[in-house]
Image (cartoon, grey):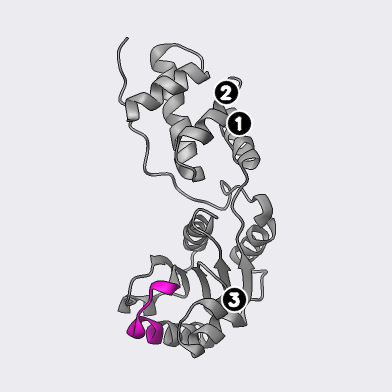
């Protein structure tokens, strides 16, 4: 049998349409309203564990705002914030807990500028604002707007998302494929969906249906 390099795609593009909400339906609704301009609250803070969907939503929100004609940017925070954020009216800041002293001052100033200029800020962290350990004035501002806890998908919800993705791509998963993939592959949804796309290509290459034995064989190629 010819072995096929799966070439799992790293360029999964997060969007509000391909976000699987699970228990986060209200957050998704609020962000859609914000993109449409019908959400009056312009400052939103999301918190939750890794792989709960925060980064997906921040990237998707910035992209949707950009496509809508807004000057928007997504940024994964480090100790300091870049100075060019002043040129954007919509800012999505991921992992604000990483900001150092200068970065926190910059966030304080950014918040005030966006508030005065009718801009929008979507920020995220691992915990509620009061538990961040940042400057009190920054914590206060992050808590002034809407604050939502993000909830990760259950295994059942992930399995449903995998079956729905397969259907949208025009193929069917054999019995137990989704469950096996959840047990033996990375747990975040983008990685799971990318593996499913790779498995579809492998199925076409080998002219075999997508079953647990085919998935097991494909995963061995990735080890």
Could you tell me which secondary element the residue under label 1 belongs to? helix
Residue denoted by label 1: 163
Circle 3 Cα neighbour tier, 10 Å, few/some/many (<14 / 14–19 / ≥20): some
Coordinates of residue 72 in the picture (x, y in percent): 45, 67
Mark closest to the chain's N terminus, 1 or 3: 3
Q: Is residue 126 visible?
A: yes
Within the magenta stretch, is there residue 185? no
- Residue at image x 32%, y 77%? 80
| Residue 6 in view here | no
Is 103 a magenta residue?
yes
Where residue 208 appears, x then y in whole percent? 47, 12
Disc 1 versus disc 2: distance between alpha carbons? 7 Å
Q: Do the residues bearing badges 1 and 2 touch, measured as CB atoms within 8 Å?
A: yes
Left or right, 212 with reference to 88: right
For disc 2, the neighbor class at 10 Å (few under 14, some 14 to 19, many from 20) is: some
Along the line of sight, which residue is nearer the eye, 161 or 68?
161
Residue mark closest to the camera, 1 vs 3: 1
* Above or below, comparing residue 1 to residue 19 in the picture: above
| Residue highlighted by disc 2 | 173
Q: Position of residue 87 (x, y in %)?
A: 38, 77
| Residue in front for this viewpoint, 34 or 164 | 164
Q: CA distance from mark 2 to mark 3?
A: 42 Å
Sequence-wise, the earlier of marks 1 and 2 is 1
């Amino acid at each position: 049998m010819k072995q096929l390099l799966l070439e799992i795609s790293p360029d999964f593009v997060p969007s509000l349409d391909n976000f699987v909400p699970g228990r986060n339906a209200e957050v998704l609704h609020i962000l859609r309203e914000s993109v449409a301009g019908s959400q009056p609250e312009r400052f939103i803070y999301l918190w939750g564990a890794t792989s709960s969907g925060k980064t997906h939503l921040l990237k998707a929100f910035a992209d949707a705002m950009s496509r809508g004609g807004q000057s928007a940017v997504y940024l994964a925070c480090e100790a300091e914030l870049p100075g060019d954020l002043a040129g954007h009216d919509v800012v999505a800041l991921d992992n604000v807990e990483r900001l150092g002293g200068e970065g926190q001052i910059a966030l304080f100033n950014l918040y005030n500028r966006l508030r005065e200029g009718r801009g929008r800020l979507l920020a995220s962290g691992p915990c509620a604002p009061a538990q961040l350990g940042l400057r009190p004035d920054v914590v206060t501002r992050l808590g002034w707007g809407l604050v939502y806890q993000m909830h990760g998908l259950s295994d059942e919800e992930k399995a449903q998302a995998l079956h729905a993705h397969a259907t949208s791509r025009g193929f069917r998963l054999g019995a137990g494929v989704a469950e096996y993939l959840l047990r033996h592959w990375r747990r975040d949804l983008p990685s799971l969906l990318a593996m499913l796309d790779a498995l579809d290509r492998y199925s076409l290459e080998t002219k075999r249906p997508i079953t647990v034995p085919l998935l097991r064989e494909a995963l061995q190629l990735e080890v």
